[in-house]
Every structure is written in C-alpha cells, then in structure tokens.
Image (tube, rainbow, N blue to C red):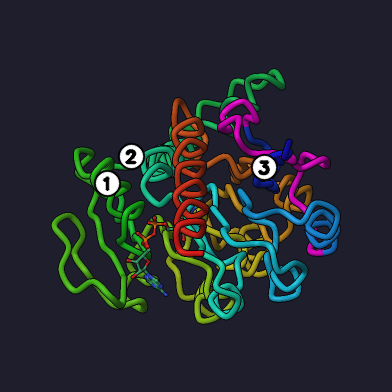
Amino acid sequence: MCEIKIIMMKILCTTSSFNANNFPSDYEVIMNPFKRKLTEEEVIGLIKEHEPDGMIAGVEPLTRKVLETSDKLKVISRCGVGLDSVDMQAASDRKILVFNTPDVPVKPVAELTVGMIFCIVRGIGSLNSGIKKGSWIRSTGGLVAEKTIGIIGCGRIGSRVASLLEPTGAKLIGFDPYIQNHSLCKMVSFEYLLTNSDVISLHIPLTPENNNLLNAESLKKTRPGTIIINNSRGGLVDENALYELLKSGHLGGAGMDVFLTEPYFGPFTELENVILTPHIGSSAGNSRVEMETSAINNLVTGLNNFVLNH
Ligand SMILES: NC(=O)c1ccc[n+]([C@@H]2O[C@H](COP(=O)([O-])OP(=O)(O)OC[C@H]3O[C@@H](n4cnc5c(N)ncnc54)[C@H](O)[C@@H]3O)[C@@H](O)[C@H]2O)c1
C-alpha cells in the first residue's frame, strides 16, 4: 500500500497584528511571534526557520538580503498599500510575486487626516487636555472653511481627503507631478503650495526621490502658522526640522500617524499642538478585516498561479 503524503504550503505572517482565524485551513500558518514591527534580522531568522512559500507582510524591511534567504518564497502579499518596505527589484529578480491592498485604506486614512485637520485647526486637543488639567481657557481656534488646504499627492487618498473637505468650503490646492487636472483641487506647483497653504497634507509614497520632501528648506518656506499632516510615511518629513519649526512657533501644528522609527516615543510627544496616532491610519471599522481578507485572497491567487505554472 502506498502512502500519500500531503505537504501543506507554509505562510509566514510577519505583519504585527493579523487575525490568524482568517486563513484557509489548507495552509500551515506561522504568525509573527514578536507582535510588533520586525527588524531585517528577525525576518531573516523566521524565513530560515520556517522556509515559507508565501508571506503576509506588514511594513518590516523586505530587503534583497531577506528575499535571498530562501529559494522557496514565491509570493509576498502586503496587508496595506505602501511597497516602500519591499525591494521590488530583488523580488522581480527572484520571480517573487508581490501584491498589495490599495483600495481598502483609502477611506480610513482620509477620515483620520480630516479628523486631525479639524482637531488642530480648532485646537480641540489642547482645549481637551487643558480642561482635564483644570483650566478653563476658552481659546476659539480657526475655521477649516476659511483655510487653504494643500494636498501633496492627489491619488486615491489625497482625492478622498479633498472630497471630504470640499463641502466645508475650504480652498483646495494640490501638487502632483503626474496629475495636471483634478476635479476638486486647483493644481499648483510645489513652491506655490508650500507658500500658500494653511494646512499641508502628504499623500505620497516613500521613494528615494520623496525622502525628506518636507525638510528644513521647504518647511521654512511655509506661511507662519501652517499645519503639517503626515499620514503617509515617516521618511517623507525631516522629523528634526519639523520639531524645531513647531517648537520655534513658525509652524502652527502637526498631525502624524507615521514615524521614521516605530513605535515612536520621541520629542513630538512634548508638544501640545501635535496630534499623534500609532500608525493606525488604515485600521478603522471593517477596513482591517477587509484588508486582511484582500491580502489573503491575493496570497492564495499568487500561490495558485505558481502551482498552475510549475
Ligand atoms: N497611515 C497608514 O496607515 C497608511 C495607509 C495606507 C497608505 N498610506 C500611505 O499613503 C500613501 C498614498 O496612498 P494612495 O493610495 O493615495 O497612493 P496613490 O498611488 O493612489 O497616490 C499617490 C500619489 O502621489 C503622487 N506623487 C508621487 N510622488 C509625489 C511627489 N513628490 N509630489 C506630489 N505627488 C507625488 C503620485 O503621482 C500619486 O498620484 C501610500 O504610499 C502610503 O505610504 C498610509
């Protein structure tokens, strides 16, 4: 009698939080044992130990060194939109399929952004902490309706931010080298946006060209009192320059969901006019479940595709 041995495909789930019950039962799943963002060495260790066929990835560095750890890896399915953490050239060289979930984070990131804008313009954060400390200082804040909002990157999330702000009557301007006309934003140059916005919100990918796009030089060109929102990626803004210009009072406030190093416990925590959230932009309501389902579907499609072609 011959024995049939069924070999289950292995999935390594490196994202820091993921509902393991969502995986189909015909895969062996290894979850991130650290339950936080992994370092390059930690991912290499997990790949060496488990030799996965596919990965559900968060924002940990999937460098060439990581991707060269095992010949078995065939599919990387990012649970999220940004692919800046994946060495795409290395993945292509090694014929590893890479997927992301671009549509699900649009609404939650846009709503977080608009929430931060209202909160900072009106001073809700400092009024809230003031009253809790026993002070009754009735500073009135500003009106979003009277502001010029500069959106850098008018793709999916930037456009959704514009559509949520449009009913307020705020003036919407946008800069995007790949978009000439936009139905809601008047498209302007980068320089014009820097010098004419009351609020600047970043909705662009982190690429080598975009690294530190908002640095000391560009931030100093902004109007006094400008509010900076970065819910895209930490490396897009020079955190030291941003901190200095907030501390000096040149900038009026900031909202940030993303940081160069996460978890973040740095000096922005000391500033009253800064709203910080722990990289939860894409996780609200059903969006996390939708994103996880979409990431698993992409992974299964990729692995099935591999099996069919080999
Ligand atoms: N906080 C979070 O949890 C979270 C979740 C999802 C996405 N994000 C970030 O949001 C970013 C935007 O997502 P999206 O879905 O809108 O992407 P998208 O690709 O739809 O839009 C990005 C836009 O940026 C433009 N762009 C690129 N470089 C630019 C530059 N230097 N100046 C101006 N415009 C530029 C592109 O032309 C494009 O139109 C992602 O890359 C990701 O980093 C963050």
Choose top left, top right, bottom left or bottom right for residue 287.
top left
Residue 38 within the magenta-colored segment of the rendering: yes
Residue bounds of the magenta highlight: 19-40
The disc, 1 or 3, on the residue closer to the chain's N-terminal end is 3
| Foreground label between 1 and 3 | 3
Task: State whether residue 246 is above or below residue 137.
Answer: below
Q: CA distance from mark 1 to mark 2?
A: 5 Å
Q: Secondary structure at mark 2?
A: loop
Q: Are marks 2 and 3 in contact (CB under 8 Å)?
A: no
Q: Give residue 43's position: percent from left, percent from top.
A: 78, 58
Q: Which mark is residue 222?
A: none
- Secondary element at tag 1: helix
64 falls in the magenta region: no
Name the residue rendered at 34%, 55% in the picture. 158
Marks 2 and 3, the one that precedes in the sequence: 3
Q: Position of residue 52 (x, y in %)?
A: 71, 53
Q: Mark 1 = which residue?
A: 146
The percent position of residue 135, horizontal first and vertical second, equals 66, 22
Please state which amino acid type lies under the numbered disc 1. Answer: Glu
Residue 228 visible in this rendered orientation of the protein: no
> Badge 3 local density, few (<14 within 10 Å), some, or many (20+)?
few
Residue 145's x, y, as percent? 26, 42
Callout 1 touching callout 2 (CB < 8 Å)? yes
Q: Which residue is mark 3?
A: 8
Gap between marks 1 and 3 measured at Cα: 59 Å
Q: Residues within 10 Å of mark 1 (few under 14, many from 20)?
A: few
Establish whether ligand 1 lies closer than 8 Å to the Cβ of label 3.
no
Q: Residue at x 45, y 57 (%)?
A: 308
Within the displayed image, which quadrant is ligand 1 positioned in? bottom left
Q: CA distance from mark 2 to mark 3?
A: 58 Å
